[in-house]
Image (spheres, grey):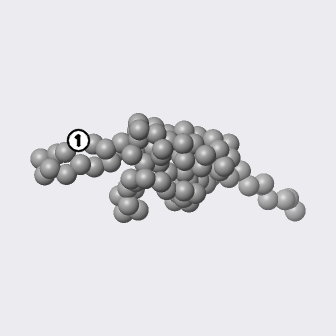
Amino acid sequence: MTDPEPSSEKIHYICQTYVTTKAGRNGQTGLKIAKQFEYSSAQEAQNRAEREALSDDFVGADAYMIREDPNSGEVADPSFLVRLGNVPGFDEL
């Protein structure tokens, strides 16, 4: 009997920033992703999101983690560590 393969799951820690888009024909502004940064720990991603949310360059920032199975290519839904400032609602992701 052989041992099952060890888990090859990868965890990605992401800081994602947002900027406001120009008003469209309906006169409403929106949000778009400005930058994404990947880190080796949850704390690093959260610290970056906190710094970026205070910046005048962005209107909001998320820090989250996602789990990826490199064997199947499947990626799980994000697990948010922190959401700061003006960020999209969950239904907009």
Q: Pick whichever, 1 or 56, lies toward us.
A: 56
Q: Which element carries disc 1, helix, strand or loop?
A: loop
Percent across and percent down for residue 77 are 52, 59
Q: Residue furthest left?
A: 25
Is residue 66 toward the left or the right of residue 60 in the image? right
Residue 12 is at least partly visible in this image: no
How packed mark 1 is, by other alpha carbons closer than 10 Å (few <14, some 14-19, many 20 or more), is: few
**Residue at left 43%, top 53%?**
85
In the foreground, 51 or 67:
51
User: Viewer-proximal residue, 57 or 29?
Assistant: 57
Q: Which quadrant, please, contains the C terminus? A: bottom left
Q: Is residue 48 visible?
A: yes
Image quarter of residue 87: bottom left
Q: What residue is pinned by disc 1?
A: 22
Q: Residue at x 54, y 42 (%)?
A: 51
Total marks in image: 1
Q: On the picture, is 74 further left or further right than 86?
A: right
Q: Amino acid at mark 1?
A: Lys
Q: Which percent across, then down, holds residue 44?
A: 65, 44
The residue under the point 13% across, 52% down is: 26
Q: Quadrant of residue 58?
A: top left
15 relative to 26 in the view: left or right: right
Q: Quadrant for the N terminus, please.
A: bottom right
Name the residue located 54 percent from the left edge and 51 percent from the top edge: 63
Where in the figure is residue 49, as x and y percent of width and height? 54, 46
Residue 11 on image: x %, y % = 65, 50
